Amino acid sequence: MQADTTLEIPLVDLNRWQLGSDAERAAVVKDVDAYLQKLGFLMVSNHGIEPAVRDAARHAAHRFFALNASIKQAYACPPDAYRGWIGPGLESNASSYSESSEGDADVLIDLKEAYSVGPAFAAVEDYRKRAPRWYAPNIWPDEVVPGFSQALTAWLHAADRCTLILLDILCSALGLEDGWVSAHCRHPMATVTANLYPEVRQAGGWRVGAHTDFGTITLLDRDTDNGLQVEVAPGQWIEAPRLENALTVNLGEMMVLLSGGRWRANPHRVAARAGAAANLSLIYFHDPDYDLELPAQHDDGRPVTAADFLGAKMDQIIQSPDASA
């Protein structure tokens, strides 16, 4: 693991956990735990996502985003589910973060478009009835981009396998029971999102404003350095490095709750630098089962479920179609 004396983002070799001795595995747990107490970001190598799987997902996403907006609109995300195309001007991540210092978060619209899909579970109808927003069917544009569903699904499955490895490490660090993941992540409210950031011709604003993530673990794969920055102390930001064939990993607010506040979910943002090339990011957001009760309560004393928590945050992000007018 890289030195953390200046709060750099460390690189963790997952082979040390999967193939290492008991002593090596214990060292990984100790190192990850110690670092996450300082900064909720890591990078991981030997993560198991093959380059061919990544490249196929990227190619499919680029082909979709290159289509005319009138064609993409047929696959637009409906108001009651986060599945499909999210056009430019329809999201403001900064609006979910009350401590943003980058101006009026309500009008800090993300400079990107996106496409989101989720896992398809067998026999999920009961979940779909109870939490339809998070288990909605995917919207696939295979008619206009053949192979899109296969490519994005393959990346989703590979990212989920990596996330399960990371969750094992985190559960070991927190002393959670061995069956915690299988008990509470049977049907995770997971989302794969492909973000396309257009070329920046004039500096100003942010591709994505300052925010924290909401769930347990986020995996990020960038095709170029897209300007990702992480706040390591109030007002102190560092550039997040990009390494070929390594993923950026960060914790969300649910994991902070589950750790009893031991770990951090750092604010992060994506700068809009003049001359920055168009960039495509593949992101896997892992959230546990919808009914997991978090160590938090509603005003009336009822426990806050994962679906409650995630729903409140997502409602803040989604903007009306005329929000950027």
Image: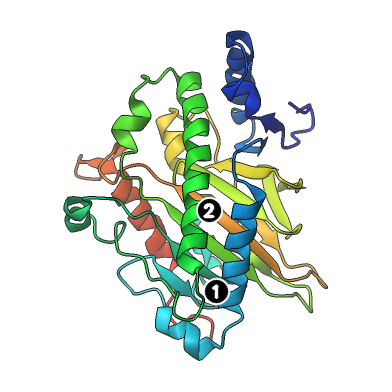
**Which corner quadrant of the image does residue 208 belong to?**
bottom right
Q: Residue at coordinates 33% horizontally, 24% vertically from top-left? A: 179
Q: Residue at coordinates 78% horizontally, 73% vertically from top-left? A: 203
Residue 267, x across and y down, in percent: 60, 48
Amino acid on which the number 2 mark rests in the picture: Trp
Residue 175 visible in the picture = yes
Q: From this viewpoint, which residue is outermost toward the right?
A: 275
Residue 322, labelled with which disc?
none
- Total numbered labels placed on residues in the image: 2
For marks 1 and 2 on the same chain, the one whose residue lies earlier in the sequence: 1
Residue assigned mark 1: 107
**Viewer-closest of 304 and 184:** 184
Residue assigned mark 2: 155
Amino acid on which the number 1 mark rests in the picture: Val
Residue 116, x across and y down, in percent: 46, 64
Q: Residues within 10 Å of mark 2 (few under 14, many from 20)?
A: many
Q: For the residue labelled by badge 1, is the local secondary structure a helix, a strand or a loop?
A: helix
Q: From this viewpoint, which residue is outermost toward the top?
A: 23
Q: Residue at coordinates 48% horizontally, 73% vertically from top-left? A: 86
